[in-house]
Structures are given as structure tokens and as C-alpha cells.
């Protein structure tokens, strides 16, 4: 019953949002490509916040906090753990118009795929390594934050799966700061069969790893292990009873 | 060194680096489409293969033609055949 209610609520708010932003979206399509993508990412950011803060409330409550210094730059590559299909929506609570790295299937979703393409999301199954890196570099040049889920796929549990090294190699090559973030409480929101449970989700942004600090690790493997350790430690702290 | 050992060594990289079920590592599977890897995963795949076989694959243009796991097996079978010292290194591991 809860799943039915929540899907209905999300559908309602999605339609309402589409009606409200139809005209702005049409205007965005007329802008130059780079500005259009930035504008669409803002539209997606607001949509994400409507879904996670209004459409699913009060059965699902999302709180966000940051342990990063308040004057820390927002530019860089954000790295999230990945428990559930709700993660790409939840990152909206950071309040940043992120460019997401996706692994193919989100780009093919009806409606969402359209917006993902308009936002300039990077499909890592269609772009080779050099192309993905070039697109990330272009985004960082215009101060667009980049969001990545280095586990590659949803864990569907509290486990933190192995991180893939690719995004860390790119971060080192581009000398981009890495912002570790963690999302907890949503392992069954929704579960792997897209059924919802009520619950509380927490999203936390942690202090960034500056480019110089990342470079000191020498290779992407060691850097990714370090970031994974940081995220795991934060998750453990947040999940302490 | 038997061809099966070389194939097992290649497959072990996919199991260790990407936690892929060994039963899914069939030669006809496409690395990107069927095994679920993306372009960023190439980093881990290359690192794993380089470590396993003790060679640098960085400038190897033949790797760009590889589509299926079977293509990758064939690449390393040929590589080991042409470089007998590689087989010796693998046997030591």
C-alpha cells in the first residue's frame, strides 16, 4: 500500500512540476548548449528536492548535513555510496546542480532520459574513457559539480561494495578535488524490486580531498581505497545506535 | 602452461575487480554490454590484467578491438604463445 501511495504521489508531483516548468524548459532548449545544460540541471535539482522533501514526506524523511568547512568550494567530483535507485534523487539535497555519471539505462528511461540527456549527463557505457574524461573536464571548467557512484551499481543493502577506480583516475589526471559523501537509510527505499518502506534517510557531505592530497596517493587504486575507507567510517558513525 | 590456465587468469581479474559471478564469464559475452562494465571500469580491468600478466598494456592498440570476453582470452593466449617468459611468470604465481 505504501509503495502504491508513494508512486502515486511522485507521479502527481512530477506532472505538476512538468506543467510548471514546461515553459522554462522550452526556453532552456533555446539557449546555447552549455547554458542550456546548466539550466536543465537546475530544473532537475528543484525536481529532485520536490520529490525527496515533499512527494514522499512524511513517510520518508530526508535530512542533510555537511561536515565540510562552510567556505569549502563546491567545485569538484562528488563520490557517493550507492544503495538504492533513490540515490540520484537524494543527491539533490546538497543543493548543487550536479552533472551525473550514469551507466546507460537511466538515459533510456522515458521522460527522465530526456532530461538526463538535456542535462549533459555522461553515459559511461557510450563514451570511452577519454571522452568521459573530456566531458568531466569541460564540466569542471564551468564549475559544474560532477556526481559519481563508484560502486557501479546499487548494493541493495548496507554493504559498501568495491569501488571502481576510473573516476579517481580522472580526478587525479584533472587535479579535481574529491568530495566524499554518504547516503544511509535508503537501502530499502526502494528495494531492488522497487518497493518502498517508510524510513529516515541521511545524506552527509564530508570534507573534500584536495587535488594535492589526492596526488600524494600516487595511483587511483590507493586513492579509491582511501575514499572508500573514509565513506565507510562515516557510514559506521552515522549508523551507530 | 595450459590455455585453460590463461583463460582462468583473465577471468580471475573480472571476479576480483568487479565481483562478477564466474558462471557469467562466458567467452561470447560482450565486456561492456553483457558483463556490465563501462568505460571507466577499463582502468581497473587494465590494472588487474597488467598485474596478473606482469606486463604493460598501455600502448597496445589490439586491445581497442576487443569486444567479447573471448576476444580478450584470444589476445592473452596469443600474447603468452609469443612470449614464453610470460607463461613462466604466471606459473610462478
Image (cartoon, coloured by chain):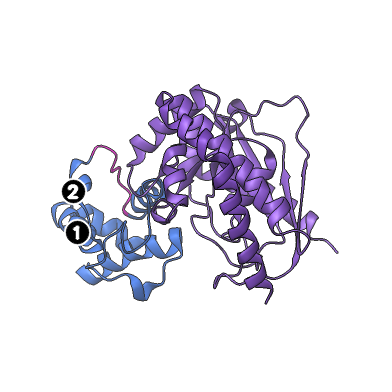
Chain colours: A purple, B blue
Task: Please tell me whether residue A198 is drawn above or below residue B52 in the rendered image.
Answer: below
Measured as percent of width and height from the top left, residue A218 is found at 52, 34
Give, as a single range, the part of the protein colored magenta. B53-59
At 21% from the left and 64% from the top, the residue drawn is: B70
A40 falls in the magenta region: no
Q: Secondary structure at mark 1?
A: helix
Q: Which mark is residue B71?
A: 1
Main secondary structure along the magenta-highlighted residues: loop
Tell me: A212 left or right of A71: left
Could you tell me which secondary element the residue under label 2 belongs to? helix
| Looking at the image, residue A3 lies above or below residue B10 | below
Q: Is residue B55 magenta?
A: yes
Q: Is residue B38 visible?
A: yes
Residue pointed to by mark 2:
B65
Viewer-nearest residue: A197 or A50:
A50
Question: What is the C-alpha distance between the residues marked 1 and 2?
Answer: 8 Å
The subunit carrying tag 2 is B
Mark 1 touches mark 2? (CB < 8 Å): yes
Q: Is residue A100 above or below residue B36?
A: above
User: In the visual, does A51 lie left or right of B84?
Assistant: right
Chain label for disc 1: B
Which quadrant would the N terminus of chain B be assigned to in this image?
A: bottom left
Residue A173 in sight here: no
| Spot occupied by residue A78 in the image (x, y as percentages of width and height) | 59, 39
Name the disc covering residue A206, or none. none
* Quadrant in the picture for the C terminus of chain B: bottom left
Q: Do discs 1 and 2 belong to a common subunit?
A: yes
Which residue is rendered at x = 75% and y = 58% of the image?
A57
Q: Answer with mark 1 or mark 2, whichever residue precedes in sequence.
A: 2
- Asked where in the image residue A161 lies, by quadrant, the reply is bottom right
Label 2 Cα crowd, 10 Å radius (few <14 / some 14-19 / many 20+): few
At which x and y percent is residue B77? 18, 60
Amino acid at each position: 500500500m505504501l509503495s502504491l501511495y508513494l508512486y502515486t504521489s511522485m507521479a502527481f508531483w512530477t506532472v505538476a512540476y512538468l506543467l510548471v516548468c514546461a515553459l522554462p524548459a522550452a526556453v532552456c532548449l533555446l539557449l546555447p548548449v552549455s547554458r542550456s545544460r546548466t539550466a536543465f540541471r537546475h530544473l532537475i535539482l528543484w525536481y529532485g528536492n520536490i520529490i525527496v522533501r515533499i512527494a514522499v514526506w512524511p513517510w520518508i524523511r530526508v535530512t542533510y548535513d555537511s561536515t565540510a568547512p562552510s567556505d569549502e568550494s563546491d567545485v569538484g567530483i562528488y563520490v557517493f555510496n550507492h544503495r538504492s535507485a533513490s540515490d540520484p534523487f537524494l543527491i539533490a539535497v546538497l543543493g548543487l546542480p550536479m552533472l551525473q555519471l550514469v551507466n546507460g539505462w537511466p538515459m533510456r528511461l522515458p521522460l527522465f532520459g530526456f532530461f538526463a540527456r538535456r542535462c549533459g549527463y555522461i553515459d559511461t557505457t557510450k563514451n570511452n574513457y577519454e571522452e568521459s574524461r573530456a566531458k568531466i573536464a569541460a564540466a569542471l571548467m564551468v564549475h559544474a559539480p560532477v556526481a559519481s557512484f563508484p560502486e557501479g551499481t546499487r548494493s541493495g543493502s548496507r554493504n559498501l561494495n568495491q569501488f571502481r577506480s576510473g573516476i579517481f583516475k580522472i580526478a587525479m589526471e584533472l587535479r579535481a578535488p574529491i568530495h566524499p559523501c554518504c547516503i544511509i537509510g535508503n537501502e530499502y527505499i526502494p528495494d531492488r524490486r522497487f518497493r518502498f518502506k517508510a524510513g529516515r534517510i541521511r545524506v552527509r557531505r564530508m570534507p573534500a580531498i584536495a587535488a594535492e592530497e589526492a596526488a600524494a596517493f600516487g595511483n587511483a587504486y590507493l586513492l579509491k581505497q582511501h575514499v572508500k575507507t573514509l565513506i565507510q567510517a562515516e557510514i559506521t558513525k552515522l549508523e551507530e545506535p | 602452461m595450459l590455455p585453460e590456465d590463461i583463460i582462468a587468469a583473465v577471468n580471475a581479474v573480472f571476479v576480483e575487480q568487479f565481483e562478477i559471478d564466474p558462471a557469467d564469464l562466458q567467452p561470447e559475452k560482450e565486456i561492456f554490454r553483457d558483463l556490465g562494465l563501462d568505460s571507466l571500469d577499463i582502468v581497473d580491468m587494465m590494472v588487474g590484467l597488467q598485474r596478473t600478466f606482469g606486463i604493460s598494456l598501455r600502448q597496445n592498440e589490439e586491445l581497442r578491438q576487443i569486444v567479447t570476453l573471448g576476444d580478450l582470452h584470444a589476445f592473452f593466449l596469443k600474447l603468452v604463445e609469443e612470449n614464453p617468459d610470460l607463461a613462466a611468470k604466471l606459473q610462478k604465481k
